[in-house]
Image: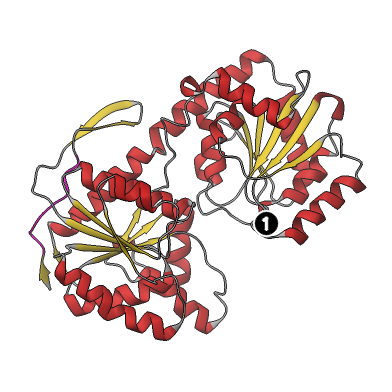
């Protein structure tokens, strides 16, 4: 048992919207040192959350340390005042994982770390043993369902993410998954949804110049409604179902965008192009690569679609689309079931069903302006009250403080 009545991270006058009410919470205390560990700092939801939480720790008067193999987001992290320690924690090689135990333990001792936050499986194994060696409480974030549950070795490998004194689940869906599959007690789980950047993803903050620039770049027609499916090109994101759904619509009124990087999946991209060609949609459906200005992309769009064939752990597209006041259609499973209020802020459709998807898109396209305006306002209010980065950071800091003010049993 470790008495952790030490230092806390302040939650400094953070203004949040909760159930349509303005709230201010503040925990007055001295600073704490929090160390987050993840494989690297490339663009992604895990990495974005790490950097945002690091900033919140610093703004709250604490000290932030991030251990990773590095990446493009390192500069942003360091500029915010966080310390970055480069270490090969991305490797799944058992020898490297074993060596990293002592390396992490040394960092913990030298920097007097109060809490370790482990965000991925390979570094979590090293961090778990390092936490035991140094008697330091640790938190894990369970970001997805992870594959290979029926494989004994993979299940054991995945289970490390359930061993935190507190286990952060990024949605109620993930919380249910880890309770049912891994037997995690409710008392250890803290549901903290991922957040969106409410400043960047705000209608008021998107200039006409940004929209015009992107519209010209993509050669968007002025006389068509735009339907967009954002997301990396991978089969489970449902691009095939989306294309087949589009084929069931009135093509004379729409222009369609599939936006996202293929991340080296050239064969799958070719398969999508062949499907477009087979259905004679070449003049309607365009595959766009990576987009650096997604807020402007949403603003150019009338209907945003998330057609994932497997449950999204959270579903950032559905939330960002609502934040921008777009009409959003998503498949009815995973995180989207939580983030969309069917018929009020968006539409939920049967997964793996192009007919159901087409019907919902058709409803959005044919909606009267007044109806569209009501849905748009509902959606913006809804996601800003529940799914902002500010709220995600606040709840994460509160989880840290919970551990630092209680007697914590390290298992």
**Location of residue 276 in the rendering, given as x and y in whole percent from the top left corner:** 85, 45
Question: Is 244 on the left or on the right of 107, as rendered?
Answer: right
Q: Secondary structure at mark 1?
A: loop
Which of 22/7 is in front?
A: 7
Q: Quadrant of the C terminus?
A: bottom left
**Location of residue 224 in the rendering, given as x and y in whole percent from the top left corner:** 77, 22
**Location of residue 61 in the rendering, given as x and y in whole percent from the top left corner:** 15, 45
- Relative to 364, say whether 241 is above or below: below
Q: State whether residue 40 appears in this view.
A: yes
In magenta, the rendered stretch is 4-11
Measuring 50% from the left and 40% from the top, which residue is drawn there?
339
Which of 126/74 is in front?
A: 74
Q: Is residue 223 magenta?
A: no
Q: Which residue is mark 1?
A: 234
Measuring 57% from the left and 78% from the top, which residue is drawn there?
150
Q: Quadrant of the N terminus?
A: bottom left
Question: Is 14 on the left or on the right of 94, as rendered?
Answer: left
Measuring 42% from the left and 49% from the top, which residue is drawn there?
48
Q: How is the image coloured?
A: secondary structure
Q: Is residue 6 magenta?
A: yes
- Relative to 143, say whether 136 is above or below: below
Q: Residue furthest top?
A: 370
**Location of residue 358 in the rendering, given as x and y in whole percent from the top left corner:** 77, 37
- Relative to 242, say whether 175 is above or below: below
| Residue 296: quarter of image | top right
Residues packed near mark 1 inside 10 Å, few (<14), some (14 to 19) or many (20 plus): some
Which of 171/204 is in front?
A: 204
Q: Main secondary structure of the magenta part?
A: loop
Q: State whether residue 395 appears in this view.
A: no
């Amino acid at each position: 048992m470790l008495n952790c009545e030490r230092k806390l991270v302040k939650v400094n006058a953070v203004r949040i919207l909760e159930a349509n009410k303005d709230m201010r919470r503040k925990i007055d205390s001295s600073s704490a040192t929090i160390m987050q560990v993840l494989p690297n700092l490339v663009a992604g939801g895990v990495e974005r959350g790490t950097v945002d939480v690091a900033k919140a720790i610093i703004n709250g008067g604490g000290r932030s340390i991030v251990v990773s193999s590095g990446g493009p987001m390192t500069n942003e992290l360091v500029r915010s005042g966080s310390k970055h320690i480069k270490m090969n924690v991305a490797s799944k090689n058992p020898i490297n994982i074993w060596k990293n135990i002592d390396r992490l333990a040394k960092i913990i001792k030298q920097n007097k770390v109060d809490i370790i936050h482990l965000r991925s499986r390979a570094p979590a194994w090293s961090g778990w043993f390092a936490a035991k060696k140094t008697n330091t409480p640790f938190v894990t974030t369970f970001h997805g369902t992870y594959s290979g549950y029926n494989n004994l070795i993979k299940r054991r490998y995945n289970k490390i993410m359930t061993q935190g004194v507190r286990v952060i689940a990024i949605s109620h869906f993930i919380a249910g998954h880890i309770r049912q599959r891994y037997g995690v007690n409710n008392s250890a789980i803290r549901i903290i949804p991922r957040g969106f950047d409410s400043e960047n993803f705000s209608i008021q903050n998107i200039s006409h110049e940004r929209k015009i620039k992107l519209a010209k770049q993509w050669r968007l027609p002025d006389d068509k409604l735009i339907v967009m499916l954002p997301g990396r090109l991978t089969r489970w994101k449902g691009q095939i179902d989306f294309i087949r759904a589009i084929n069931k619509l009135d093509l004379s009124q729409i222009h369609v965008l599939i936006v996202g990087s293929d991340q080296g999946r050239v064969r799958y991209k070719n398969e999508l192009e062949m499907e477009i060609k087979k259905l004679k949609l070449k003049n309607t459906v365009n595959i766009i690569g990576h987009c650096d200005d997604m807020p402007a992309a949403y603003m150019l769009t009338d209907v945003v679609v998330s057609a994932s064939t497997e449950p999204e752990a959270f579903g950032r597209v559905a939330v960002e689309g609502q934040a921008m006041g777009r009409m959003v259609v998503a498949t009815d499973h995973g995180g989207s079931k939580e983030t969309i209020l069917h018929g009020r802020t968006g539409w939920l459709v049967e997964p793996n069903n192009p007919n159901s998807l087409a019907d919902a898109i058709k409803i959005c396209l044919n909606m009267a302006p007044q109806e569209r305006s009501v849905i748009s306002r509902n959606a913006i209010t809804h996601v800003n009250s529940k799914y902002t980065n500010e709220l995600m950071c606040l709840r994460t800091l509160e989880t840290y403080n919970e551990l630092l003010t209680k007697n914590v049993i390290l298992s």
